């Protein structure tokens, strides 16, 4: 399983340095990545995720393979829902 990173240059730089080869700054490539057979994880930043169409966002959040992880510096409801759906437990419950 491979990892792909989608986002702004400042976001993807660290992943490139870590050795991830599948890196893109073009949000239009999300559709292609979602249908890729060899990907296990797609990592994107919140600003790039927000630029996607509503259908693509929904497909990304529902995708099981590859799993789409949206990284942000603020709490994320999407990540919380993905964790609940994956393991059946709300880890962030207050």
Image (cartoon, rainbow, N blue to C red):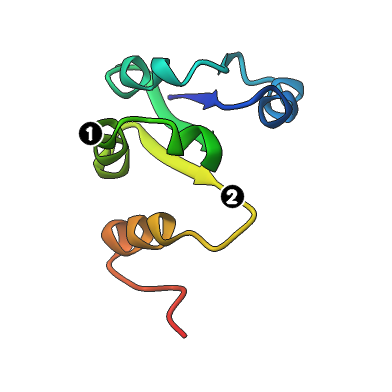
Q: Nearer the viewer, mark 2 or mark 1?
A: 1
| Other residues around mark 1 within 10 Å, as few (<14) / some (14–19) / many (≥20) | few
Element at label 2: loop
Residue occupying image coordinates x 46% and y 42%: 69
Q: Position of residue 4 (x, y in %)?
A: 50, 23
Residue 49 in sight in this render: yes
Residue 45 in sight in this render: no
Return the residue at label 2. 72
Q: Residue furthest bottom?
A: 94
Q: Quadrant of residue 10?
A: top right
The image shows residue 9, relative to residue 57, as above or below, that is above
The image shows residue 24, relative to residue 70, as above or below, that is above
Q: Position of residue 71 (x, y in %)?
A: 56, 46
Looking at the picture, tell me which residue is in the foreground, 37 or 57: 57
Residue occupying image coordinates x 43% and y 56%: 79
Mark 2 and mark 1: Cα distance apart in space = 21 Å
Q: Earlier in the sequence, mark 2 or mark 1?
A: 1
Residue occupying image coordinates x 44% and y 73%: 91
Looking at the picture, tell me which residue is in the foreground, 16 or 55: 55
Return the residue at label 1. 55
Q: Position of residue 68 (x, y in %)?
A: 40, 38
Element at label 1: helix
Q: For the N terminus, give its image quadrant.
A: top left
């Amino acid at each position: 399983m491979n990892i792909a990173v989608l986002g702004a240059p400042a976001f993807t730089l660290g992943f490139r340095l870590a050795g991830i080869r599948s890196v893109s700054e073009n949000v239009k490539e999300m559709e292609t990545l979602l249908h890729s057979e060899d990907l296990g994880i797609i990592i994107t930043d919140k600003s790039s995720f927000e630029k996607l169409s509503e259908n693509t966002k929904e497909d990304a959040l529902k995708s099981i393979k590859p799993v789409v992880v949206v990284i942000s510096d603020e709490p994320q409801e999407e990540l919380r829902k993905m964790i609940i759906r994956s393991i059946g437990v709300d880890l962030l419950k207050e």
